[in-house]
Image (cartoon, rainbow, N blue to C red):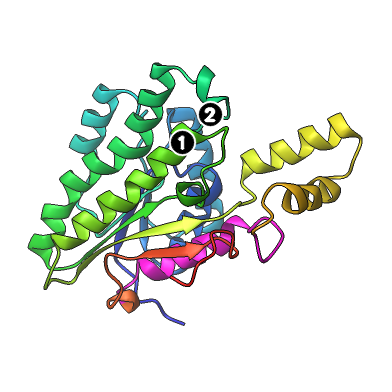
Amino acid sequence: MDLKLEHKTAFISGSTSGIGFATAKSLLKERANVIINGRTQKGVDVAMEKLKSDFPNATILGLPADFGNPKDVQSLLKQLPKVDILINNVGIYKSESFFETSDKDWYNQFEINVMSGVRLSKHCLPKMLDAKWGRILFISSECATLVPADMISYSMTKAAMLSISRGLAQLTKGTNVTVNTILPGSTLSEGAEQFLEEVAVNEDKTKKEVEKDFFTNVRTSSLIQRFAEVEEVANTITYLASPLSSATNGATIKVDGGSTGGIL
């Protein structure tokens, strides 16, 4: 299927690995121009090299910025060209007791996970409205509604995205600009791979056994009973970023394997 993304330019925050990197590849397959982002120049360079190897004729740019550093963010916004598609993907998390989570940890996760999308959207949305076309996507998480006891601060940030996304969508009424949220479930990113490997070593099990235990004992609400591949999430993001998704606005689209339940 042709998603009609040729010549569209997308910026993806936090895209040197995981879902963000998989989304960059998916968009490039659809002949979009892609701007990736990572915290360091080295990380951006490594990711750029991989992408250019796979897509030698594509237009690919890289802009490093640490979204926990306001000066970095201001520098990024000055360098960022006009984009048709903004994917607010960057995020950090901490797994620890609510009683041990410091104020600094709360603020840091809010700064990076939430304010990155606020600042980027404030910069990009007016230009999209002027151009009469655009896509903004927030990448949230199943944790926005499941709220694990050891990730309350992270879950708060992912829930905040839902409100911001819906609010921004209200500003696009009657235009060809849309704002939506993607809600992935447990996904086999590099972090998840590392988690499986560490537990496998510590408990003398295979990674498959650890994965099975996780869905049997922890993420019991999952219907697919496995980690989603990053490409599976990226496929949905790419469709929602395309002109073909024009009737979807102000929505939360689940790619959670059924873990969050409900009929809506």
Tell me the quadrant of the picture where the C terminus can be found. bottom left
Which of the two residues, 233 or 50, is positioned nearer the viewer here?
233
Residue at the limit of the structure toward the left, as seen here: 130
113 sits left or right of 179 in the view = right
- Where does residue 243 sit, x and y in percent of width and height? 30, 75
Image quarter of residue 150: top right
Report the residue at 56% width, 36% height from top.
Answer: 149
Q: Give yes or no for contact between labels 1 and 2 (Cβ–Cβ under 8 Å).
A: yes
Left or right for 18, reference 60: right
Which residue does the image show at 43% across and 50% down from the upper left? 140
Q: Is residue 92 above or below residue 87?
A: above
> Residue beneath label 1, please?
154
Provide the residue designation for mark 2: 94
Secondary structure found at label 1: helix
Answer left or right for 16 relative to 190.
left
Q: Earlier in the sequence, mark 1 or mark 2?
A: 2
What distance separates the C-alpha of mark 1 from that of mark 2? 7 Å
- Hey, what amino acid is under mark 2? Lys
Callout 2 secondary element: loop
Q: Which residues are magenta?
A: 222-243
Dot 1, how many residues are within 10 Å of its Cα: few (below 14), some (14-19), or many (20+)? many
Residues 55 and 175: in front is: 175
Instruction: Name which residue lies at 66% across and 66% down.
Output: 223
Work out whether residue 166 can be spotted.
yes
Instruction: Assess whether residue 231 is covered by the magenta stretch.
Output: yes
Q: Which mark is residue 118?
A: none
List x then y, in percent, for residue 221. 64, 58
Q: In the displayed structure, does residue 222 sit left or right of residue 50?
A: right
To which quarter of the image does residue 7 belong? bottom left
Which amino acid, mark 1? Tyr
- Label 2, residues with CA under 10 Å away: few <14, some 14-19, many ≥20: some
Q: Is residue 56 visible?
A: no
